[in-house]
């Protein structure tokens, strides 16, 4: 069944192995750092992404503070820290291929790597099932 | 939320729907860039049935139109269309619209969806001369078939002579086997093409016939997202963004549709503006550094002083440049003037440019 906004949330990709936030970001944990991007749902909502601006590399930021912005043709959206920590790296490929966030949000479209400051914050992130509920998918 | 007669088709095409002016409207199908490209270089179809249509009929219909609109409707002949606006009494604009002259005593006004009620009340208020008014918005479907290949798609669907139809002209007749269809050489994209007015009950059939004819030309459904990027590349005003109840047609660069050869609402004050100049003007600008201007962002001079505000902005898919419209003080309105757009606290270097942004090939 498709929803009133025409998006079919049931065919939307929400990988089981990732963690999620209410801000529609995904988090992949690897050792003492995480990789962060926006979800398939989020890229669909934003539409054609024009560029990503992250000027916080090297900074240590609190959970839920803004670490960058993402500009689509139609709109602009802030990017929020899913957990507290240092922004280690921004995906440099996005400079020339911002559209990879649209085409491969969980792969080539990753946005930043963050060094984990407090492991316990990871437990507060959403599971794939919880995120599905969040966006109204079944 | 109202639905157009093509709602089910949009759903089946997987369109992303958004509420707009009380309607559930498709904002995009395959993505704004692809849709934009299709219209610039091929052909695309928009369902813009949310737009309003009023029929004005009677011996005094022209007098009423002359009174409420700024352009000179006496220049119209049956079969011609005119772009115009309705000034209010306070120096602003009630709406911008198209006037179709159907016959000697009958006109069709095509108004913005968000202004249907306001416009109806406004015109009614000025209708002291007994003009018959009909609001046919809810039973009318409006399709915009736009792009350089639009003619190729629709010419064989009708006996009307679309090949020789001049810009801002129209014909009425049988289209896709259905009677009472009006086809005009108009649009909001700068890509050429047609706007087709038809009765709701024929909407799905006509949509389907256009798409099956257009298949070979790779015809695409196009949403409101690309409609906005296309019109902005041409520097066309969008009511609610670039013009509204507070902006004057002279400030907005609509002096060319403001004719003082006749009397109309607020003509004295507007003529005074035209003769003595206005403080601010709507200009086009492009960004020289990274950023995308959005409605409401401040416009600054080199000294970081506020000199205006952005009314529309986007990344131009055709030019791959960030472009926008905004009001600035006169001193900054000349092309090539350096201005700055404040984006998230940073002053982004920009330049006033002549409109349109996009020059058709």
Image (spheres, grey):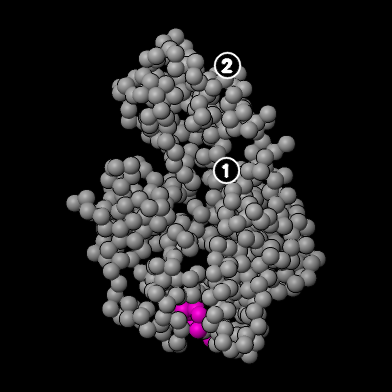
Front residue (pair B148, B168)? B168
Question: Disc 1 to disc 2, how far (Cα)?
Answer: 28 Å
Question: What residue is at 52 percent from the left and 73 percent from the top?
Answer: B83
The answer to whether one can see residue B164 in this image is no
Front residue (pair B231, B132)? B132
- For disc 2, the chain is A
Question: What residue is at 42 percent from the left and 77 percent from the top?
Answer: B89
Measured as percent of width and height from the top left, residue B248 is found at 39, 71
Query: Taking B190 as reference, is B298 left or right?
Result: left
Residue B73 on the magenta segment: yes
Measured as percent of width and height from the top left, residue A87 is found at 36, 22
Instruction: Give the answer, above or below, for where B191 lies relative to B111.
Output: above
Quarter location, residue B119: bottom right
Q: Which mark is residue B31?
A: 1
Residue B71 on the magenta segment: yes
Image depth: mark 1 or mark 2 in front: 2
Q: Residue furthest top?
A: A31
Q: Which residue is mark 2?
A: A17
The magenta stretch spans which residues?
B67-74
């Amino acid at each position: 069944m498709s929803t009133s906004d025409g998006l079919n949330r049931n065919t939307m990709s929400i990988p089981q192995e990732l963690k999620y936030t209410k801000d529609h970001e995904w988090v992949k944990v690897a050792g003492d750092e995480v990789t962060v991007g926006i979800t398939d749902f989020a890229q669909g909502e934003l539409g054609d992404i024009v560029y990503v601006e992250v000027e916080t590399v090297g900074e240590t930021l609190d959970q839920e503070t803004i670490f960058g912005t993402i500009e689509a043709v139609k709109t602009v959206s802030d990017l929020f820290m899913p957990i507290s920590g240092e922004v280690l790296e921004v995906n440099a490929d996005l400079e020339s291929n911002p559209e990879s966030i649209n085409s491969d949000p969980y792969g080539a479209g990753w946005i930043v790597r963050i060094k984990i400051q407090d492991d316990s914050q990871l437990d507060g992130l959403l599971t794939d099932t919880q995120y599905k509920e969040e966006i109204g998918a079944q | 939320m109202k639905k157009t007669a093509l709602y089910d088709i949009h759903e089946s095409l997987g369109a992303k729907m958004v509420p707009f002016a009380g309607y559930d409207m498709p904002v995009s199908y395959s993505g704004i860039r692809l849709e934009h490209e299709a219209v610039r270089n091929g052909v695309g179809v928009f369902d813009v049935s949310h737009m309003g249509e009023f029929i004005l009929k009677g011996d005094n219909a022209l007098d009423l139109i002359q009174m409420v609109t700024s352009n000179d409707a006496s220049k119209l002949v049956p079969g011609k269309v005119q772009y115009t606006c309705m000034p209010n009494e306070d120096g602003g604009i009630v709406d911008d619209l198209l006037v179709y002259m159907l016959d000697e005593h009958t006109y069709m006004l095509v108004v913005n969806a968000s202004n249907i009620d306001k416009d109806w009340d406004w015109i009614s208020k000025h209708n002291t001369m007994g003009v018959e008014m009909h609001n046919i918005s809810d039973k009318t479907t409006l399709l915009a078939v736009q792009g350089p290949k639009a003619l190729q798609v629709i010419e064989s669907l009708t006996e009307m002579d679309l090949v020789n139809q001049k810009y801002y002209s129209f014909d009425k007749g049988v289209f896709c086997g259905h009677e009472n269809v009006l086809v005009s050489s108009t649009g909001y994209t700068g890509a050429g093409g047609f706007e087709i007015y038809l009765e709701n009950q024929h909407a799905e059939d006509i949509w389907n016939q256009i798409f099956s004819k257009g298949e070979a030309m790779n015809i695409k459904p196009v949403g409101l997202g690309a409609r906005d990027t296309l019109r902005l590349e041409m520097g066309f005003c969008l009511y609610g963004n670039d013009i509204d109840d507070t902006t004057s047609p002279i400030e907005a660069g609509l002096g060319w549709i403001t004719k003082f050869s006749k009397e109309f609402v607020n003509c004295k004050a507007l003529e005074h503006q035209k003769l003595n100049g206005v403080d601010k003007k709507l200009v086009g600008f492009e960004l020289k550094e990274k950023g995308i201007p959005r409605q409401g962002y401040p416009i600054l001079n080199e000294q970081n002083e506020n000199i205006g505000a952005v009314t529309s902005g986007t990344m131009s898919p055709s030019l791959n440049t960030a472009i926008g419209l905004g009001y600035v003080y006169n001193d900054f309105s000349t092309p090539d003037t350096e201005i700055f757009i404040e984006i998230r606290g940073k002053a982004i270097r920009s330049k006033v440019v002549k409109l349109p942004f996009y020059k058709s090939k």
